[in-house]
Image: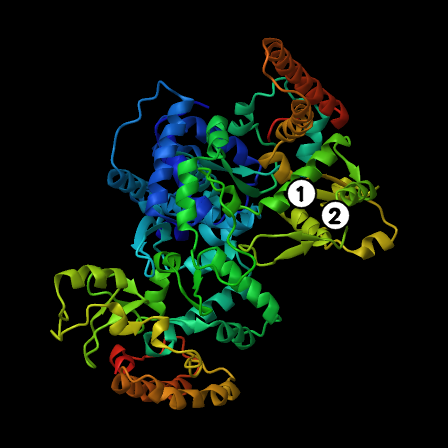
């Protein structure tokens, strides 16, 4: 079969598919290598010079009609540019059926739900709590905790979830790239947006002012704080380092502060609530940085859980407004 | 869609009509894809539609073709053949008779954008009739294999499909070579804060296409060895024989086969893995003496009970192995392995410094080539006939 120019793109797309998610740097290297490889097979071939952005545009021209998009986000932890072929329809999780059994997908959804509903914008869940989700699955599954651990590490290995040093699961760059339509439609009230890059955000900093809704990625904060030390909205003076800001992501919680399991539908988890419910109040004073905001958010959160009970069997996400979660 | 609704659902158009239609349409593809003539040729589906509806119909076809491409791409992850009824359910909806046109349009997109195509797997009957008629050609030309010139499908196909690369074999080969720069970038991409998990991420090899992350390469290696064993046993191998061979390689029925962290199981027993391979269509297990026309044989789980019940089974290549791997490639794999192994041993004995040694080395090169050829012929003999091209 003769080789032609378009093979560069084909080879490149197959390279991307084989990885799922990859850094912009690696993507560009792969593009270079794809060009070299095609050229080496047919030296006569005249491969047009173009730059990366043009190439990405061309790729997306071919993917567009398929509701796929080769797009990137900045990794929330490392700030690296990460690319993936994202599904623009919100059926990504359904499409994971190619990879995972139905019960594993329900488990994934449950873990994602706990991450999205986690208290104090922590967008993370402890590994214990993640494993506990197995027993709450509906319909009841016979997945064992041991199995669930393996499945969780598969989610991590495939880049759907991140596992931190503290052992907490959170959303990865791939999840943000590929699941954003799903997350936005399922958890519209829980979505935070960075005021700098307008991308969805689950890790970063929040303005310390109690009522201010300004949130930024770490990398966006670094960029912004080089220009200004004031909040973009409330003009409060900000500390120079992100650590002194209010945290979004797992740093917002200490171990054991996860609190109650939050659900959109009530599940028989009353015993769990009793187990962990007390922790919250005890831990309250141990974080003096934001006592005001936190204690309030706790009360609100608790009330929300009660509200959930009233919304039995409703398929719509819990109407927990941004405001109520914030302060 | 209005069009689908206005049409009567004639179930009559049997599958026999499809292959010829596909070919006819394929020929036409070069000319004008949106040709109205195409619609007319399928006259009986068209009785009442006027031009406006036809335009809507073309859009429907396009929309469904896009859906089929998505389905094929997402489905390929689990390496399970895509079934026609799944396509009907998820893509075609009520317009089941549009399959041929949707399939054709989807093929165009897959080939043009992704360098892939949907390949219909062979039925057992097809495979048997093909092996009866010697169709294999002498040349081991790798290109032809990968291109996979589709032979004319016979009447009723298997109605199951896999995705296969249409890239030039030289490109595929080059895409598995290690590049230093890719390796470096991959190392940077690997999560730095590895958790306490002893199963780290899958290791990267610096190749353009990352087989190690897209596939479970360790179990795949075992599969290819089994395919090789079955091939050189005359294309069919008794269950006992296969197991005895595997045991020599350290694989017992209850033994564990390790999967990478990307998988949802750390290990599978050999029996469980074999069950998977049958389901995926890589291997085929039949009861000895069973009527092959009676269907696909037992598709159930493989267990100790089978052996205890005194039934004997034999293993053959499954249709997916025929269409995805190909006998010639496995033949080349065996020959390469055998010959290179020998050469590696030779090389250790000798230091190539003098001119005479160089000449010897050159001769060795030629010898090796000859040996490779001989080996390939031997493999074909052991298989019981010319190794077939990829199907």
A311 to A12, vertically: above or below: below
The kind of secondary structure element at disc 2 is loop
* Quarter of the figure that contains the C terminus of chain A: bottom left
Please tell me how crowded label 1 is: few (under 14), some (14-19), or many (20+) other residues with Cα within 10 Å: some
* Residue indicated by mark 1: B222
Q: Is residue B335 left or right of residue B200?
A: right
Q: Is residue B21 above or below residue B297?
A: above
Q: On screen, A281 above or below A60?
A: below
Dividing the picture into quadrants, the one containing residue B48 is top left
**Number of dots carrying numbers:** 2
The chain to which mark 1 is attached is B
Q: Nearer the viewer, residue A257 or B350?
A: B350
User: Is residue B69 in view?
Assistant: no
The colour style of the image is rainbow
Q: Position of residue B322 (x, y in %)?
A: 63, 34
Q: Could you say whether the residue bearing mark 1 is in a helix, strand or loop?
A: helix
Residue A308 occupies which quadrant of the picture? bottom left
Picture coordinates of residue B232 (x, y %)?
A: 74, 30
Pick the front one: B130 or B10: B130
- x, y (%) of residue B120? 56, 38
Q: Are marks 2 and 1 in contact (CB under 8 Å)?
A: yes
Image disc number at residue B344 = none
Q: CA distance from mark 2 to mark 1?
A: 10 Å
Identify the chain of the residue marked 2, using the numbered disc in the image.
B
Residue shown at the point (30%, 88%) measured from the top left = A295
**Within-10-Å neighbours for mark 2: few <14, some 14–19, many 20+:** some
Q: Which comes before the other along the chain, label 2 or label 1?
A: 1
| Foreground pick, A188 / A256 | A256
Asked whether residue B111 is in view, the answer is yes
Q: Which residue is mark 2?
A: B251
Mark 2 vs mark 1: tell me if same chain.
Answer: yes
Name the residue at the right extreme: B310
């Amino acid at each position: 079969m003769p080789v032609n120019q378009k093979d560069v793109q084909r080879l490149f797309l197959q390279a991307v598919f084989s990885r799922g998610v990859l850094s912009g740097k690696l993507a560009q290297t792969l593009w270079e290598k794809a060009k070299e490889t095609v050229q080496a097979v047919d030296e006569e071939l005249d491969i047009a010079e173009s730059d990366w952005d043009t190439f990405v545009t061309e790729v997306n021209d071919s993917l567009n009609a398929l509701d796929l998009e080769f797009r990137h986000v900045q990794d929330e932890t490392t700030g690296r540019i990460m690319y993936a072929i994202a599904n623009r329809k919100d059926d990504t999780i359904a499409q994971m059926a190619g990879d995972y059994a139905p019960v594993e997908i329900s488990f994934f959804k449950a873990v994602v739900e706990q991450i999205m509903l986690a208290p104090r914008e922590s967008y993370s869940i402890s590994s214990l709590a993640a494993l506990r989700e197995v027993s709450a699955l509906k319909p009841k599954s016979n997945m064992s905790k041991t199995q669930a651990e393996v499945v969780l590490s598969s989610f991590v290995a495939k880049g759907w979830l991140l596992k931190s040093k503290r052992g907490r699961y959170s959303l990865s760059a791939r999840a943000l790239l590929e699941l954003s339509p799903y997350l936005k439609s399922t958890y519209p009230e829980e979505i935070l947006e960075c005021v700098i890059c307008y991308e969805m955000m689950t890790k970063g900093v929040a303005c310390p002012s109690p009522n201010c809704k300004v949130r930024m990625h770490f990398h966006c904060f670094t960029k912004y704080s080089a220009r200004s030390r004031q909040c973009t909205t409330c003009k409060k003076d900000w500390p120079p380092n992100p650590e002194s800001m209010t945290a979004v992501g797992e740093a917002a919680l200490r171990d054991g502060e996860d609190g109650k399991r939050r659900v959109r539908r009530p599940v028989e988890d009353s015993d769990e609530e009793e187990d962990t419910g007390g922790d919250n109040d005890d831990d309250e004073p141990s974080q003096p940085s934001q006592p005001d905001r936190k204690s309030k958010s706790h009360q609100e959160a608790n009330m929300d859980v009660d509200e959930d009970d009233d919304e039995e069997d409703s398929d719509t996400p819990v109407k927990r407004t941004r405001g109520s979660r914030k302060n | 869609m209005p069009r689908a609704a206005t049409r009567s659902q004639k179930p009559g158009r049997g599958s026999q009509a499809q292959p010829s239609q596909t070919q006819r349409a394929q020929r036409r593809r070069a000319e004008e894809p949106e040709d109205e003539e195409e619609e007319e040729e399928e006259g009986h589906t068209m009785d009442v539609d006027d031009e406006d509806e036809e335009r809507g119909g073309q859009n429907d076809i396009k929309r469904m073709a896009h859906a089929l491409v998505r389905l094929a791409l997402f489905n390929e992850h689990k390496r399970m053949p895509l079934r026609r009824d799944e396509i009907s359910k998820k893509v075609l909806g009520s317009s089941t008779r549009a399959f041929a046109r949707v399939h054709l349009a989807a093929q165009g997109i897959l080939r043009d954008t992704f360098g892939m195509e949907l390949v219909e797997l062979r039925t057992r009957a097809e495979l048997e009739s093909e092996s009866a008629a010697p169709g294999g050609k002498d040349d081991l030309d790798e290109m032809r294999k990968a291109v996979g010139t589709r032979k004319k499908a016979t009447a009723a196909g298997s109605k199951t499909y896999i995705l296969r690369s249409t890239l030039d074999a030289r490109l595929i080969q080059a895409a598995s070579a290690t590049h230093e720069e890719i390796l470096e970038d991959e190392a940077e991409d690997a999560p730095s804060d590895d958790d306490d998990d002893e199963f780290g991420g899958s290791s990267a090899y610096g190749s353009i296409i990352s087989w190690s992350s897209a596939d479970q390469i360790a179990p795949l290696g075992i599969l290819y060895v089994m395919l090789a064993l079955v091939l050189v046993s005359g294309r069919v191998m008794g269950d006992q024989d296969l197991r005895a061979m595997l045991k020599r390689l350290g694989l017992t029925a209850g033994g564990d086969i390790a999967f990478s962290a990307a998988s949802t199981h750390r290990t599978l027993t050999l029996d469980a893995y074999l069950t998977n391979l049958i389901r995926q269509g890589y291997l085929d297990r039949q009861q000895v003496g069973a009527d092959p026309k009676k269907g696909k044989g037992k598709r159930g789980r493989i267990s100790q009970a089978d052996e205890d019940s005194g039934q004997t089974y034999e293993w053959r290549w499954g249709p997916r192995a025929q269409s995805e791997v190909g006998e010639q490639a496995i033949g080349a794999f065996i020959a390469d392995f055998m010959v290179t192994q020998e050469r590696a041993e030779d090389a250790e004995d000798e230091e190539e410094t003098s001119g005479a040694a160089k000449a010897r080395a050159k001769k060795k090169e030629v010898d090796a080539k000859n040996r490779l050829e001989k080996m390939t012929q031997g493999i074909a003999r052991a298989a019981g006939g010319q190794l077939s091209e990829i199907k």
